[in-house]
Image (cartoon, rainbow, N blue to C red):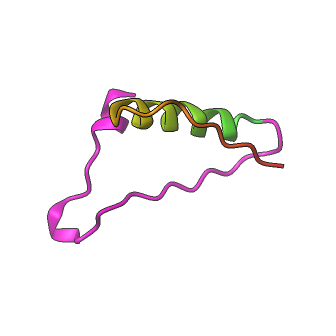
Amino acid sequence: MEDFVAFKPPREMGLSDVRILMLGPVGAGESSFYNTINSVFKSRKGLGPENLHTA
């Protein structure tokens, strides 16, 4: 998890954001994974956790 949070794209790529595609069957935990990662990043910025709900 620490490696994931610390990841930064190489400067020479000219990217400011990282996009991750999550695929899986309904109920496999994609939203839970997103919520966990989102909470880590929001807490680093001093904001409260935010949930994503998908249908």
Q: Position of residue 12 (x, y in %)?
A: 15, 69
Q: Residue at x 49, y 30 (%)?
A: 48
Q: Residue at x 71, y 34 (%)?
A: 29
Q: Residue at x 39, y 57 (%)?
A: 18
What is the quadrant of residue 27 in the picture? top right
Q: Position of residue 41 (x, y in %)?
A: 40, 37
> Which residues fall within the magenta stretch?
1-27
Instruction: Note whether 8 is above or below 29 in the view shown.
Output: below
Q: Position of residue 7 (x, y in %)?
A: 29, 44
**Camera-nearest residue between 21 and 46:** 46
**The N terminus sits in image quarter:** top left
Q: Position of residue 46 (x, y in %)?
A: 36, 31
Q: Residue at x 53, y 31 (%)?
A: 49
| Total numbered circles | 0
Q: Is residue 37 toward the left or the right of residue 54 in the image?
A: left
Would you say residue 36 sits in the magenta stretch? no
Looking at the image, the residue that sits furthest to the left is 12
